[in-house]
Amino acid sequence: MTWLSDAALDRLRLAAESPDLSATRYRLVDRIGRGGMGVVFLAEDQILGRRVALKVVDVPDESGDLAARLVREARILAQLEHPGIVPVHDAGALPDGRVFYAMKFVEGRSLREHAASLDSTTDRLRIFQKLCDAVSFAHSRGILHRDLKPENVMIGPFGEVLVLDWGVAKLLRPLAGDSASEVDSSAGAVPARPGTRDGAVVGTVGYMSPEQSRGESAALDARTDVFSLGMILKFLLGEPARVSAPVAAVCAKATSLDPAFRYASVSNLAADVARFLDGLPLEAYPDTLFRRAGRFVRRNQVVVWLVVAYLFARIILILFSRP
Amino acid sequence: MNKILLGIILGTVLGIFDGATAWFTPAVRNEILGIMIGSTIKGLIAGALIGVFARLVNSLALGIIFGLGVGLLLAFGVAYMQHGYYFEIMLPGGLVGTIVGFCTQKFGARPSPTAARA
Amino acid sequence: MRQALTLQRLSPLRQEWIRCTLPFRSGVVHSEKDAARLRQYSVDGSPNSEASRGGFPLTRWSAILAARSGDSSERSRALDTLLAAYWKPIYKYIRLRWSKSPEDAQDLTQDFFFRLLDKDWLGSFDPRRARLRTFLRACADNLVSNHHRAGQRQKRGGGSPPLSLDFAAADGELSRLQPSAPPEMDEFFDREWARSVFTVGVERLRAELTARGKSVCFQVFERYDLQDALPDAPDRRPSYQDLARDLRISPTDVTNYLAAARRDFRRIVLDFIREMTSSDEEFRREARALLGADPPGSAEAHE
């Protein structure tokens, strides 16, 4: 029998995994990595002469479930035209029968890798705001991500923030052109297309909300993504000791175990972050007179010091004035 | 609020306050009303001058220096009329001028370019 | 070196096992009956049907379930499949992990597979709780531990000659792989399992393409994907132009043959994985484990 070296094993592994792109417009360039239900490859669109990322179902499934889920992911992406969401270009089936979709190839780093290079809290919060913009847009289209984590956020070469991997997204209302049965809303119902049965747990440990980890799929709403975003914010800000009290309050409110105590929406969370950056009072950190005064002093330190100097001079003159 | 108005209001308020502190000096307590009126007018004039300067010149450093200078000058005038107490009058006066100079440069609305051209 | 085989003094189960597994293990056809058996099981693997060629057999056959069947032909077929994927990894594992001599490791390996069926070890395997690889390794560890406790060299079948497995080849492979430091056993076993599975895949692909009159297709695949370097240029991997020149075909044919062979290879390997699993979920998990490990560095650009 043929002896297979380690190098041959690796080549065979790649050969078996690589998609058959013959009779397509794509030429395989490289393997990028593995996503939820598929593998992502770098390919070249030979008609348009640009690079794309191809996500391909990794293993065959007799039920067709994986294929349906991949197509669903592509259709969700197609509905979300936003600078913070990777656009999808194409979808279909390859000659070897595997379903795929083609999306924009983004050369960048994941947020987890990029975070180490961020110097200031302000930079981190600005990135977080962009992330919230994208997720908030998806929510406005009735789509929850359900798997937000630093690995699913890409920072592009121009500083753009992109949300990836919508494979376990939940639809709160039908996609354009679909029937009502597409919606993953009824507890225990078997959807016509792949959705999540109540009881099934989707998401990533450490970033998914408590209700998500309990498998309460039917009860999920925007606040589940708020929780995940709060955890991402905690990751971005690092050690709690380094974080100011108002920002810590924002994190705490976003990651509250009870959804009733969280921000009602991602846009509320983003607004509070914006208010923090502008030195304004926060929803998560109610203003007291003392805090307001402290904020005023921080924002107007020069004036405050001049006034203190004037008062000090006045007091000295009064105390030591000549008769 | 434009810079001139800001300067006037700030100068007036600080002038009132500055005059009121004379109450802590028993020797001049009897003349407190006159002192306060004089200080208020001084503050108003200083604030107006500093506000006009801020409208014309957009420079924090120059605004502070101008404010300090106006404050010291007007305070010198008051001290000259008092025939003394130069230090006791000019030091606080200079500080107040500095405060107004800083605030008129940092805050207050700048005239819009189209309005200026018109 | 393969030793002479004597069946008479062995139990009926042993005799059945030897007859059914001999052609596969030795890699040499001993009789027409063995050849037919080889074609039936080793070439197409799962039921020789059009459905299986498409990678989606109409009925799912599982070696795990068949190993516990009352039908002896099903059991022997199951053992074939399990042997194909696991006998070398088990043998190498016992040699390295337990530092056994070749002779002791051979005995233990033989005993392992006999007991796997005889003692119905697979009856306690639950794919929801562990992978088959982990389970079999644990069984091997238990077997070796029990041997230590027994304190004697285990003989099979009351002193009969050892069965014919190509241990020399396995020892040769082990000597090629012998790492300078003791390997991480999990990773080592998984890698050897992948090596066995891909080896089966390659051999089945060879047989299938040859039977279909497409041996050139296989040669392209063999030279490009299996060989580490050109025979006359050890520091260079073959290019499409090299293959086209050597095989006297066009580079376009090289591209097409390679794509076709890889397509068939993937199907064959996945079918083989399917035979060793008992549910769709387990199949996906095992397929991902086989295919999904990130290769070191990035792949070379396809020409």
Image (cartoon, grey):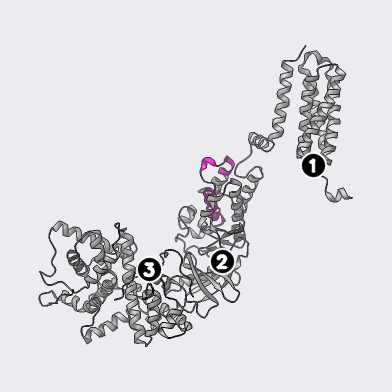
Q: Quadrant of the N terminus of chain A?
A: bottom left
| Label 3 chain ID | A
Tell me if C284 is positioned left or right of C65 in this view.
right
Q: CA distance from mark 2 to mark 3?
A: 28 Å
Going by the numbered disc 2, the residue's amino acid type is: Phe
Q: Residue A197's x, y, as percent?
A: 47, 64
Q: Position of residue A173 (x, y in %)?
A: 58, 65
Is A232 contained in the magenta span?
Answer: yes
Labels 1 and 3 share a subunit: no
Whether residue A259 is visible: no
SS state under label 1: loop
Residue farthest right in this picture: B118
Which label's residue is closer to the chain start, 2 or 3?
A: 3
Q: Give the secondary structure at mark 3.
A: helix
Mark 3, other Cα within 10 Å: few <14 / some 14–19 / many ≥20: some
Q: Is residue A119 left or right of residue A67?
A: right
Label 2 resides on the chain identified as: A
Marks 1 & 3, CB-CB < 8 Å contact = no
Q: Secondary structure at mark 2?
A: loop
Q: Which residue is mark 2?
A: A105
Magenta stretch, residue numbers: A219-248
